[in-house]
């Protein structure tokens, strides 16, 4: 997936030098960990250390990779993509999930399907990466867990990325994939669109485009830390900069390519959401996008959209992907599985998904004592309450 057509890459010697430099930066980042006082914080010591190490590692990668010329960045990305393609498939299979590289409407991607038993629905998943990086292979474990818990087949699309392909290239790819899935027989009442970070922003743009071109309504939308406001002027952008994993100077210009960051359908925080499907939103209380996501959730609820919101205090951007073992992440997995099960036509209603805020109409996930899977796949020990 890292060998995308029309994308220049640097020579192997230069790429090797960049990888050595990245390894050195990781070493420096790990050396900084004790000075961050990882033993302090709201959680227990192992959790706090894991949060600190993850934050330092991801920030280091983002900072280093964003400093590279684009051809060198693509070469490093290709190596990491190949590494994920080698290491992760056995782990995916161990979860009872099969993966197959394929294409839909000419857009490359990977299908993830549960072993043994009928597929209960379909998810089109748009991966994050700041609109400029990552690949479907890098999402293998996260998507495999979603696949196992929901019983849905999931197609992770390898959309065109900036700066080589700025807006609206990625959105155009997502639109043609969704349209082909419907043409090929996907049941709209069992079809979900999901995404994280920039992929969550693209998912919002896709739903906006879909509802304004009179497509049939789909079952729901699954968003993890969605980047729904590219203006990036909320108080949490600066207020959470010290505790989130994102760089303080979040890049958007390569993707926007001169387009206004607040325009529709680029930013979804204030866009017209009439006709939106039921929506699940998960985000961290310590992330830089917190305010824009909260505003988006309230906007959906006030517009009458069936909305379930899960905000985890003390957690950073896309925490279920980066720290799947954490209690907050396990709660997120159970919650999104419950949402999917509740919005499939042959399962129970969504009435018990959370406490409803009467001022906004949003159901907030607050109960951590229940289990998921009574009407779907068998409960997984990994997700049981500790």
Image (cartoon, helix red, strand yellow):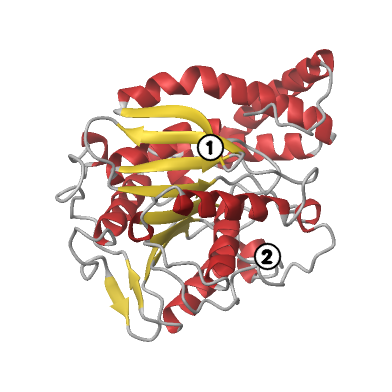
Q: Residue at x 78, y 69 (%)?
A: 260
Are circles 2 and 1 on residues that touch, CB within 8 Å?
no
- Position of 315 with respect to 160 (left or right) is left
Q: Which residue is drawn at 24% across and 67% down?
A: 350
Q: Which mark is residue 54?
A: 1
For mark 1, give the secondary structure: helix
- Position of 233 with respect to 148 (left or right) is right
For residue 201, which quarter of the picture? Answer: bottom right
Q: Nearer the viewer, residue 181 or 371?
A: 181
**Closer to us: mark 2 or mark 1?**
2
Position of residue 345 measured from the top left corner of the image (x, y, whole percent): 24, 61
Q: Which mark is residue 76?
A: none
Q: In which quarter of the image is the C terminus?
A: top left
- Position of 260 with respect to 177 (left or right) is right
- Packing grade of label 1 (10 A; few <14, some 14-19, many >=20) is some
Q: In which quarter of the image is the N terminus?
A: top right
Q: Which residue is drawn at 19% across and 55% down?
A: 369
Q: Mark 2 points at which residue?
A: 266
Q: Nearer the viewer, residue 51 or 131?
A: 131
State how far apart marks 2 and 1 are (Cα): 29 Å
For residue 365, which quarter of the picture? Answer: bottom left
Q: Residue furthest left?
A: 374
Q: Which residue is drawn at 24% across and 40% down?
A: 118
Q: Which residue lies furthest to the bottom in this view?
A: 359
Position of residue 229 measured from the top left corner of the image (x, y, whole percent): 64, 66
* In this view, 48 is above or below 331: above
Q: Which of 86 and 321 is in front in this view?
A: 86
- Packing grade of label 2 (10 A; few <14, some 14-19, many >=20) is many
For mark 2, give the secondary structure: loop
Going from the N terminus, do you reach mark 2 or mark 1 first?
1
């Amino acid at each position: 997936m890292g060998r995308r057509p029309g994308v220049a890459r640097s020579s192997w010697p230069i790429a090797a030098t960049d990888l050595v430099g990245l390894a050195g930066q990781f070493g420096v980042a790990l050396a900084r960990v004790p000075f961050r006082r990882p033993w302090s914080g709201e959680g227990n010591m192992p959790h706090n250390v894991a949060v600190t190490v993850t934050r330092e590692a991801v920030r280091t990668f983002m900072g280093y990779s964003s400093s590279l010329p684009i051809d060198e960045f693509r070469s490093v990305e290709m190596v990491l993509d190949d590494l994920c393609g080698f290491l992760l498939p056995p782990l995916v299979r161990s979860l009872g999930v099969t993966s197959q590289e394929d294409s839909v409407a000419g857009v490359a991607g990977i299908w993830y399907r549960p072993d043994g038993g009928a597929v209960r629905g379909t998810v089109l998943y748009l991966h994050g990466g700041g609109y400029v990086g990552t690949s479907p292979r890098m999402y293998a474990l996260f998507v495999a867990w979603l696949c196992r818990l929901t019983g849905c087949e999931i197609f992770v699309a390898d959309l065109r990325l900036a700066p080589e392909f700025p807006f609206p290239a990625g959105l155009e790819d997502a639109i043609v994939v969704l349209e082909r899935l419907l043409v090929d027989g996907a049941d709209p009442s069992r079809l979900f669109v999901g995404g994280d970070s920039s992929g969550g922003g693209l998912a919002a743009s896709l739903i906006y485009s879909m509802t304004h071109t009179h497509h049939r309504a789909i079952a729901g939308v699954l968003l993890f830390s969605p980047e729904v406001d590219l203006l990036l002027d909320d108080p949490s952008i600066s207020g959470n900069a010290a505790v989130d994993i994102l760089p303080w100077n979040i890049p958007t210009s390569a993707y926007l390519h001169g387009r206004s960051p607040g325009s529709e359908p680029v930013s979804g925080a204030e866009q017209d959401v009439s006709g939106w499907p039921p929506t699940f939103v998960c985000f961290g209380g310590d992330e830089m996008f917190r305010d824009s996501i909260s505003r988006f959730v309230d906007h959906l609820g006030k517009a009458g959209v069936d909305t379930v919101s899960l905000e985890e205090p003390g957690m950073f951007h896309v925490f279920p992907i980066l720290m799947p073992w954490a209690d907050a992440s396990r709660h997120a997995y159970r919650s999104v599985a419950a949402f999917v099960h509740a919005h499939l036509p042959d399962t129970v209603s969504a009435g018990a998904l959370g406490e409803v805020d009467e001022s906004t109409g949003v159901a907030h996930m607050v109960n951590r004592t229940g289990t998921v899977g009574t009407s779907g796949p068998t409960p997984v020990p990994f997700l049981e309450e500790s």
